[in-house]
Image (tube, helix red, strand yellow):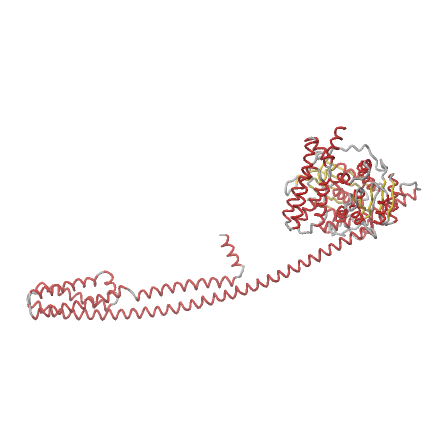
């Protein structure tokens, strides 16, 4: 049935004229078949058996009449009993033949023609008259009368034969004429049928040629689209490279400005000098925000934007946003309020950094444009009308000037601001709301606003954030990153003189010892003559860049190849960070380098580096273990299943990595992307349960690329390298260290 419907739709698609021709062809075919059947019927009528029997019966009657006449003539010439008996026999035979004239098919055949019917009736009348005389056959007078009647009967029989022959000839002539006319009509129907079928063939051929040309045009268009896509990809790659270059070129001097002003503000300054230095710092931060906005919108447009998935404290995040913006309202009669509905949990899962970015942008806009009144930040639970899911609704309401009606439809477009006076007075790039909209949509949320000119605005967005359990508080001991708890011996590899001074200044302020190397070759010389706890390696340098320098170090013999290296890169894209990891760096730090970020990074490395120092060198497997595995997850496993079972689980997992590595590498190399994606998904689930967070992130990135059509080369290299590193780690020792820590606690 489905095929019939499909065929009928295909016929309808060819047009009304085609349907009319097809209907006419079917009609002509039916008419031709009907005429053919009628002609067959006429031919059968010509050869009718009843007609032949009627003619044969007439001949029989004529012959028997003649025999009867001859018998009577013999009886009349010489009467005797034998001849009389022969006459009676002949009469009986003739009389039996006469019965065919008034019953059955022969009767209908004889009565069809008037002349034949009249001759037959005359013959019957005469034979019946003879039947009345036959009993007196022995009398001479009766014999003479019978002979006379036999003469008349014979004449009637001859006339009957002639009439039957004549009627049969007339019928055949009529039937042949009718057959000829039908043959003419049949020929006409066949000609029309051939004409309509030929027209259909011509139409189908033309449509087939049109479809062939259309298919050719489609293929040409597909080739053009592929070429256009390739050019667009090349343009996108060129744009990414341009942004990376611009980012590096801008962030390098920005690193010097922000670093030097930070160091300057840490010294004793006169009030006016402090105001000048603060202005420089704020201007640099504003310029850095513009640069970050441009990079964010570029990543969002290219689809290479990745969201973090972590547990965070929503109340703390909101309070931090409000406190950061409240400092900007010191000179304004504006109150900044935070309302958090009761019944909403405190901890949720999501990307706290991007949520903070959206809130800071919306609240920052409200602070920027509101000169008096209030700004209210509110969070409440709502139910989505479309899918009836539970969501959090974030609202930022202000009493500012509002948004002009002609601007509102374009507000979430790039580079759109209220008007020229707004841009001159408040500045900005017009990218903030665009980034907010795309970030919210990437987090599967919705964003909107309501505004009345002169009365204020209300911006809102809703997100479905899964609630989470409160994380176990880490015992930090109230550590302060302003001073290192243990000085480290650090080599700074940086070609820019200003950045060298900034890095050395921050490190010395934090209490660490720092040496300088201007490029990769000098760094290799220094590492060959002195031992360092950590290397801060700039990525882009002349002569020998940071990536190649790191690769050279990783190929050196122990203990130098295990040197801890942290990359410093102005390329904040995921590709730039991935390049650091692929080259063999243990960690990376984005430029401009801020004191707080550097102090936090060094604090995280201090424990590992101190332990490595006790063993005489920095051991790569220990430093990498901190980045590869979450010891908190290991601690939970030890507590739940015991140290021995946990050790067995991790060792079994480590031994299976070789097989996983082979299967993923082979499937990707053979182009079996689905198989490679399924293998990554399976491995990712196991790795997540055991705490290998870096492996989980890299497998997820590779799985995402494999699901599309992009080149998985970079992601595959990162995954294979991580599998090799974890395969060489001493997981048993990690379990033992965690178990020992739990016993001491």
Q: Position of residue 214 (x, y in %)?
A: 59, 62
Residue at left 71%, top 58%? Answer: 231
Residue at left 53%, top 65%? Answer: 205
Q: In the image as oriented, which residue stretches furthest toward the right?
A: 270
Choose between 594 and 678: the one closer to the eye. 678
- Occupied quadrant, residue 479: top right
Q: Position of residue 591 (x, y in %)?
A: 82, 46
Choose between 365 and 585: the one closer to the eye. 585
**Residue 218 placement, left or right of 99:** right
**Residue 70 placement, left or right of 418:** left
Tally of numbered tags = 0
Residue at left 48%, top 67%? Answer: 198
Can I make out residue 441 in this image? Answer: no
Q: Please, is residue 630 above or below residue 289 in the view?
A: above
Q: Position of residue 293 (x, y in %)?
A: 78, 49
Q: Position of residue 427 (x, y in %)?
A: 81, 50
Q: Please identify the quadrant where the C terminus is shown.
A: top right
Can I make out residue 486 in this image? Answer: yes
**Residue 36 placement, left or right of 670:** left
- Occupied quadrant, residue 48: bottom left
């Amino acid at each position: 049935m489905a095929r019939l419907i499909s065929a009928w739709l295909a016929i309808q698609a060819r047009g009304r004229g085609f349907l009319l021709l097809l209907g006419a062809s079917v009609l002509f075919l039916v008419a031709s078949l009907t005429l053919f059947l009628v002609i067959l019927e006429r031919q059968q009528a010509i050869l009718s058996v009843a007609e032949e029997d009627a003619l044969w019966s007439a001949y029989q009657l004529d012959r028997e009449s003649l025999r009867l006449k001859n018998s009577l003539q013999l009886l009349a010439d010489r009467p005797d009993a034998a001849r009389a008996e022969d006459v009676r026999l002949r009469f009986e035979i003739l009389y039996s033949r006469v019965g065919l004239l008034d019953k059955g098919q022969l009767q209908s055949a004889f009565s069809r023609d008037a002349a034949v019917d009249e001759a037959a009736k005359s013959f019957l009348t005469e034979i019946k008259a003879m039947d009345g005389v036959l009993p007196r056959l022995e009398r001479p007078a009766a014999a003479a009368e019978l002979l006379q009647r036999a003469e008349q009967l014979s004449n009637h029989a001859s006339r009957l034969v002639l009439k039957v022959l004549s009627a049969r000839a007339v019928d055949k002539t009529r039937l042949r004429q009718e057959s000829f006319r039908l043959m003419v009509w049949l020929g006409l129907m066949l000609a029309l049928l051939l004409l309509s079928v030929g027209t259909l063939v011509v139409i189908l051929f033309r449509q087939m040629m049109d479809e062939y040309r259309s298919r050719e045009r489609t293929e040409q268009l597909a080739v053009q689209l592929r070429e256009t896509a390739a050019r667009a990809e090349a343009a996108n790659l060129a744009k990414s490279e341009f942004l990376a270059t611009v980012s590096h070129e801008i962030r390098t001097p920005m690193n010097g400005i922000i670093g030097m002003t930070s160091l300057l503000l840490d010294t004793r300054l006169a009030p006016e000098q402090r105001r000048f230095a603060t202005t420089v710092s704020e201007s640099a931060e504003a310029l850095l925000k513009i640069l970050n906005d441009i990079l964010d919108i570029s990543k969002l447009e290219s689809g290479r934007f990745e969201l973090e998935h972590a547990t965070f404290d929503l109340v703390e995040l909101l309070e931090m946003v409000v406190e950061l913006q409240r400092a900007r309202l010191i000179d304004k009669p504006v109150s900044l309020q935070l309302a958090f509905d009761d019944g909403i949990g405190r901890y949720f899962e999501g990307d706290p950094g991007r949520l903070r970015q959206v809130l800071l942008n919306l609240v920052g806009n409200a602070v920027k444009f509101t000169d008096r009144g209030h700004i209210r930040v509110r969070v409440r639970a709502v139910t989505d009308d479309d899918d009836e899911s539970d969501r959090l609704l974030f609202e930022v309401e202000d009493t500012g000037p509002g948004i002009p009606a002609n601007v509102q439809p374009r507000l979430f477009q790039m580079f759109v601001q209220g008007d020229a006076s707004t841009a001159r007075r408040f500045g900005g790039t017009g990218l903030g709301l665009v980034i907010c909209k795309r970030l919210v949509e990437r987090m599967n949320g919705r964003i909107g606003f309501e505004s009345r000119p002169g009365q204020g605005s209300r911006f809102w967005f809703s997100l479905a954030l899964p609630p989470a359990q409160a994380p176990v508080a880490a015992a930090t001991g109230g550590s302060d990153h302003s001073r290192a708890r243990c000085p480290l011996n650090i080599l700074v590899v940086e070609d820019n003189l200003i950045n060298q001074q900034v890095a050395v200044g921050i490190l010395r302020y934090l209490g660490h010892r720092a040496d300088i190397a201007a490029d990769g070759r000098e760094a290799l010389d220094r590492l060959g003559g002195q031992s360092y706890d950590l290397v801060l390696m700039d990525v882009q340098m002349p002569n020998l860049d940071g990536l190649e320098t790191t690769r050279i170090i990783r190929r050196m013999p122990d203990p130098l190849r295990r040197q801890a290296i942290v990359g410093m890169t102005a390329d904040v894209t995921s590709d730039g960070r991935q390049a650091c990891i692929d080259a063999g760096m243990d960690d990376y730090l984005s430029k401009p380098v801020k004191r707080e970020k550097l102090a936090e990074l060094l604090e995280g490395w201090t424990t590992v580096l101190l332990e490595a120092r006790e063993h005489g060198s920095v051991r790569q497997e220990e430093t990498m273990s901190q980045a590869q595995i979450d010891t908190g997850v290991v601690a939970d496993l030890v507590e739940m299943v015991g140290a021995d079972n946990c050790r067995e689980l991790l060792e079994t997992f480590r031994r299976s990595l070789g097989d996983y590595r082979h299967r993923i590498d082979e499937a990707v190399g053979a182009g079996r992307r689905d198989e490679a994606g399924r293998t990554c998904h399976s491995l990712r689930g196991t790795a997540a349960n055991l705490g290998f967070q870096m492996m989980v992130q890299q497998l997820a990135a590779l799985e995402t690329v494999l699901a599309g059509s992009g080149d998985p080369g970079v992601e595959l290299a990162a995954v294979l390298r991580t599998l090799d590193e974890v395969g060489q780690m001493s997981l048993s020792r990690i379990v033992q260290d965690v178990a020992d820590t739990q016993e001491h606690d």
